[in-house]
Image (spheres, rainbow, N blue to C red):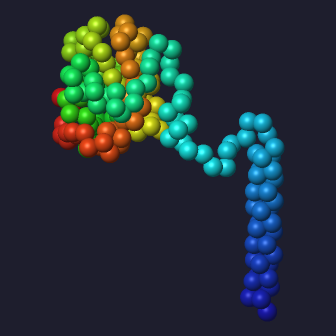
């Protein structure tokens, strides 16, 4: 008898919880649907991230533009990811300048960066904005010729372009 009462009580609690969760989902979906700034149900996040607003004074470049700059040797590529991501795979010849360690890492690389040279920052993929932050930090430190490669390592690899693995200099 006691076990039956407990089971019945648990079933009522579960039904109540299920009712609250269902009502919450319906209410949230309703509000989201009718809000002018609601979150889209389906969206191509890659397209949205490509059209993101970059910091003032900084341009984004496509995979083709990045490849052309790499092949011509006219740009220095800076990887904004942490050292672990850099070691796993980075654009050949790139330097690692993690945005989350900018204050300590930048002075060590500053002598290798020419303020007149073209610098291309990148990170993992189109959804990563660490490259935007790195470009802005460089701009604030007097580097005016900075661009962001929006596709990052993922698109670089998908294009069959060379990656390096190994330690940070």
Q: Is residue 38 left or right of residue 65?
A: right
Occupied quadrant, residue 97: top left
Q: Nearer the viewer, residue 142 or 101?
A: 142
| Coordinates of residue 146 in the picture (x, y in percent) | 37, 16
Residue 84 visible, this angle:
no
Position above or below: 144 against 148: above
Occupied quadrant, residue 122: top left
Q: Is residue 130 left or right of residue 168?
A: right
Q: Which residue is at a point 77% across and 89% down the rendered structure image?
A: 4
| Coordinates of residue 83 in the picture (x, y in percent) | 28, 35
Occupied quadrant, residue 34: top right
Position above or below: 32 against 17: above
Q: Is residue 65 left or right of residue 59?
A: left
| Coordinates of residue 79 in the picture (x, y in percent) | 31, 30
Q: Quadrant of the C terminus?
A: top left
Q: Nearer the viewer, residue 62 or 14?
A: 62
Residue 72 visible, this angle:
yes
Q: Quadrant of the N terminus?
A: bottom right
Q: Which residue is at a point 31% across and 18% down the rendered structure image?
A: 119
| Coordinates of residue 18 in the picture (x, y in percent) | 76, 67
Q: Residue placed farthest to the bottom in the image?
A: 1
Question: How many numbered discs, if any?
Answer: 0
Q: Which residue is at a point 29% across and 31% down the rendered structure image?
A: 67
Q: Which residue is at a point 54% across and 42% down the rendered structure image?
A: 45
């Amino acid at each position: 008898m006691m076990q039956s009462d407990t089971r019945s009580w648990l079933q009522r609690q579960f039904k109540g919880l299920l009712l609250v969760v269902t009502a919450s989902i319906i209410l949230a979906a309703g509000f989201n649907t009718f809000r002018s700034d609601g979150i889209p149900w389906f969206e191509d996040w890659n397209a949205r991230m490509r059209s993101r607003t970059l910091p003032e004074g900084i341009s984004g470049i496509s995979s083709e533009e990045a490849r052309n700059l790499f092949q011509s040797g006219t740009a220095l590529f800076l990887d904004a990811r942490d050292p672990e991501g850099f070691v796993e795979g980075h654009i050949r010849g790139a330097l690692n300048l993690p945005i989350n360690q900018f204050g300590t890492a930048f002075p060590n690389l500053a002598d290798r960066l020419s303020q007149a040279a073209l610098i291309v920052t990148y990170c993992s993929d189109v959804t990563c904005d660490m490259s935007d932050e790195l470009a802005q930090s460089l701009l604030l430190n007097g580097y005016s010729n900075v661009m962001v490669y929006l596709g990052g390592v993922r698109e670089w690899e998908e294009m069959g372009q060379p990656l390096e693995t190994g330690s940070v200099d």
